[in-house]
Image: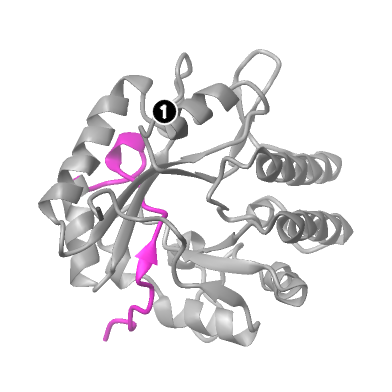
Amino acid sequence: MKDKIFVTHNYHCHTKRCGHATGEDEEYVLKAIEGNYKLLGFSDHIFLPGLEQPGMRGSYSLLDGYTSSIRNLAKKYKGKIDICLGFEAEWYGEKFRKYYQNLLGQGIVQYLICGQHCFLDDSNRFVWYGSIFDEESRKERTIQYANALIDAMKSGLFLYIAHPDLFMSWNPSWDETCEECARKIISAAKERDVVLEVNMGPSRWGKKDAYGNPLPSYPNGRFWELVSEAEVHSIIGVDSHRPEELIDSPFDWIRHFLEERHLRAFSSLPLKGLESK
């Protein structure tokens, strides 16, 4: 028996253009309709002019095809589901600020969510935060990650922060650095009234506890206890990379995770579908 789907608005959905998702754009829409979603926001990994990252994000040449496909689907399924158009993007300092501003200001996309997976080194190469091999580097990367999220919040360009506790994917256990960085991220979110995403991705990856329940690296229990204590708002991101994940993800587990920590979770955000007018 499938879990009861209680998520009605999902702003975190990828497409096969990123290189690690599967399925056609329309298949995601049809699964969302099957799951009684009211809104589906496409937010593929952002295409960056002049930079390629095969297997992580699509080429910049795919931009027009992506935007036109989602807009056409919004028209086709108007009245059945609202569809929004965005990107999941890292904050690379000033390097792509103008590009992000143009995407939003010119209405090419409606929103950006910040998903901080990697950074650019001095040679303009992508570096994964988790590509580390010693304890000291792990601490440095965790601090670097937290500072990048805080700078992203300061930019005012992002609808919300995706998987803010991603740093637990390269930290084997919660320590003082994790606690310090979590508090910094949460404090910045509270100060700027930024929503933090409880990400469902790792809950589908097969890691289980002794009772067969999902045991992901994130969402991390301690991080979200701190979010709850600070009374910062959250939202669920399905982070779908297959159409089926919109309906067969562990929704019962994530509901329990929220309720257990008394999280102040939004069911939706003030963003209208492309064809809502």
Answer with left or right where residue 40 lies relative to residue 195. left
Left of 199 or right of it: where is 128? right
Q: Which stretch appears magenta? A: 1-24
The percent coordinates of residue 62 (x first, y second) are: 29, 25
Q: How is the image coloured?
A: one colour
Which residue is tagged 1? 47
Helix, strand or loop for the magenta stretch, by majority: loop
Residue ranking furthest to the front: 277
Q: How many marks?
A: 1
Residue 246 visible in rendering: yes
Q: Is residue 58 magenta?
A: no
Q: Is residue 229 above or below residue 269?
A: below
For label 1, the crowd category at 10 Å Cα-Cα, with few meaning under 14, some 14 to 19 and many 20 or more, is many
Along the viewing direction, whichever of 218 and 189 lies nearer the viewer: 189
Q: What residue is drawn where x is 65% and y is 82%?
A: 261
Query: In this view of the protein, which residue sits in the foreground, 178 or 173?
Result: 178
Which residue does the image show at 28% across and 40% down from the upper left? Answer: 16
Left or right? Give the position of 164 relative to 66: right
Q: Where is residue 271 shown, x and y percent of the image? A: 41, 55
Q: Is residue 14 magenta?
A: yes
Horizontal and vertical percent for residue 213? 50, 80
Give the residue displayed 14% in from the left and 56% down from the top. Answer: 77
Is 9 situated above or below 83?
below
Picture quadrant where residue 81 is located? bottom left
Between residue 173 and residue 227, name the one nearer to us: 227
Residue 50 locus on image (x, y percent): 47, 13
* The quadrant where residue 35 appears: bottom left
Q: Residue at x 71, y 57 (%)?
A: 189
